[in-house]
Image: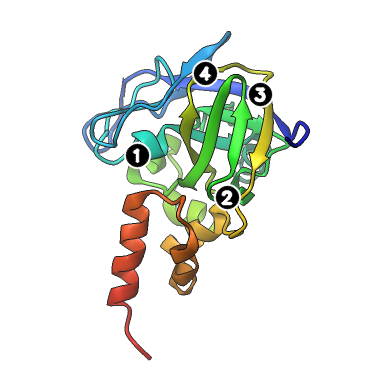
Amino acid sequence: MQSDWGELISVNVGRERPIAAKGGTSGIDKRPVQGPVAIQAPGPKGVGGSGLAGDHISDTAHHGGDDQAVYAYAREDLDIWEAELGRALPSGSFGENLTTAAVDVSGAVIGETWEVGTALLQVSSPRIPCVTFAVWLGQERWVPRFTAARVPGAYLRVLRSGEVRAGDAVRVLDVPGHGVDVRTVFAAFTTRPELLPLLREVPQLPREDRDAVGRRLQQAPRA
């Protein structure tokens, strides 16, 4: 086991609130909570929502489920966005469940396992920005701007149920040898499709992502 790698500085959950996007409600407005929060695998996408107790996901067809049970974002990256946008971004502002310190979340390798509190989590995929995210922040051309920055944060699946709270250490227990990180997967799916072949060697990606890689490579024009 590696030594402490970082710290969980905030656990954030969201209630269902009105928003002028998609179905009209969202749980993207996540706010820090005190004390321990139970965490568990919520079930498949379309059936399960968030992995955190008390956290709401409205659009369960596209968000949540076992492979997107938890969303993590680095406080350091939020601080950079604060400076660029000229506005305060409290922990939870990007709709993240876990706000970390001293963790390169977007540089984490797909399949990396983290021990946080008594829970065991596994990095599964990057967050791909959607219209709800843009409406929530109220920034013009937010989706392309966020995409260009390539600091998407990471979705995590729950390998072992437990409890997490602010102040918990984030420990890396295992890093797969393929070396493909969250940032690379994000780029492959958004602006750099030439990276897609790398993703074929990443068994820890969600099934729907691996299927999408196969379809896109099959459809790609041959030289």
Q: Residues within 10 Å of mark 4 (few under 14, many from 20)?
A: some
Rounded to the nearest whole Å, what is the CA distance between mark 2 and mark 1? 18 Å
Give 81 or 61, whichever is nearer the viewer. Answer: 61
Residue 55 as seen in the image, left or right of residue 104:
left
Specify whether residue 101 is in view.
yes
Rounded to the nearest whole Å, what is the CA distance between mark 3 and mark 4? 17 Å
Rounded to the nearest whole Å, what is the CA distance between mark 3 and mark 2? 19 Å
Q: Name the secondary structure under disc 2.
A: loop
Are discs 4 and 1 less than 8 Å apart at CB? no
Please determine whether, in this image, residue 215 is positioned above or below residue 17.
Answer: below
Q: Residues within 10 Å of mark 1 (few under 14, many from 20)?
A: some
Residue 144 sits in quarter: bottom left
Q: Name the secondary structure under disc 4.
A: strand
Find residue 91 and report its horizontal and vertical position in percent: 58, 27
Find residue 118 and report its horizontal and vertical position in percent: 59, 19
Mark sitting earlier along the chain (3/4): 3
Q: Which residue is mark 4?
A: 162
Q: Which residue is mark 3?
A: 9
Residue at image point 67% right, 30% down: 170
Rounded to the nearest whole Å, what is the CA distance between mark 4 and mark 2? 27 Å
Q: Which residue is mark 2?
A: 151
Residue at image point 39% right, 48% down: 206
Residue at image point 39% right, 39% down: 67
Q: Which mark's residue is nearer the viewer, 4 or 1?
A: 4
Are discs 3 and 4 less than 8 Å apart at CB? no
Q: Which residue is mark 1?
A: 132
Residue 223 as seen in the image, left or right of residue 83:
left
Specify whether residue 87 is in view.
no
